[in-house]
Image: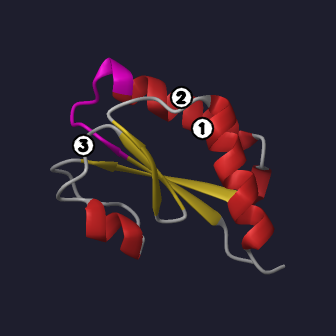
């Protein structure tokens, strides 16, 4: 079963807000175990994973830091709450085929 992807687009070097976003996203994703994969892309650096189509469409206009869940923008230039991220992940996992 493919993993749900949470993508973070952050500054290089990361700002304090970027660091907070990474820590929060990792904490929430850990609650879902193997079902969720986090990909972190740093502006101006080589992407270590193939970005989703949704990310590729937004990457030139998106404001940092940003977080996408399964290719859909959840937040940019701010930290979403853990509750908001958790709800977005749960919603996407319910829709994915088992």
Q: Is residue 17 left or right of residue 74?
A: left
Question: Residue 43 in the image: x percent, y percent?
Answer: 21, 47
Residue 29 in view: no
**CA separation, marks 3 and 2?**
19 Å
Judge whether residue 84 is colored magenta.
Answer: no
Q: Quadrant of the N terminus?
A: bottom right
* Residue located at (46% from left, 23% from top): 20
Per the image, label 2 sits on a secondary structure element best described as helix
Question: Residue 55 in the image: x percent, y percent?
Answer: 36, 64
Question: Residue 6 in the image: x percent, y percent?
Answer: 54, 54
* Residue located at (71% from left, 46% from top): 87
Per the image, label 3 sits on a secondary structure element best described as loop
Can you identify the residue that label 1 sits on?
26
Question: Which label was assigned to residue 23?
Answer: 2
Residue 72 in view: yes
* Residue located at (47% from left, 65% from top): 71
* Residue located at (37% from left, 43% from top): 66
Are there few (<14), some (14-19), or many (20+) residues within 10 Å of tag 3?
some
Are there few (<14), some (14-19), or many (20+) residues within 10 Å of tag 2?
few
Question: Which label was assigned to residue 63?
Answer: 3
Per the image, label 1 sits on a secondary structure element best described as helix
Marks 3 and 2 close (CB-CB < 8 Å)? no
Relative to the observer, which residue lies in front, 69 or 43? 69
Residue bounds of the magenta highlight: 9-17
Q: Nearer the viewer, mark 3 or mark 2?
A: 3
**CA separation, marks 3 and 1?**
20 Å
Q: Nearer the viewer, mark 3 or mark 1?
A: 3
Q: Residue furthest right?
A: 98
Marks 1 and 2 close (CB-CB < 8 Å)? yes
Marks 3 and 1 close (CB-CB < 8 Å)? no
**CA separation, marks 1 and 2?**
5 Å
């Amino acid at each position: 079963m493919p993993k749900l992807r949470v993508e973070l687009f952050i500054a290089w070097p990361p700002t304090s807000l970027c660091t907070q976003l990474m820590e929060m996203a990792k904490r929430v994703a850990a609650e879902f175990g193997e079902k969720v994969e986090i990909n972190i892309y740093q502006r101006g650096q080589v992407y270590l994973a193939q970005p989703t189509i949704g990310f590729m469409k937004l990457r030139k206009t998106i404001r940092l830091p940003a977080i996408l869940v399964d290719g859909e923008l959840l937040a940019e230039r701010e930290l979403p709450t853990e509750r908001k991220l958790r709800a977005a992940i749960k919603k996407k996992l319910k829709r994915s085929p088992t």
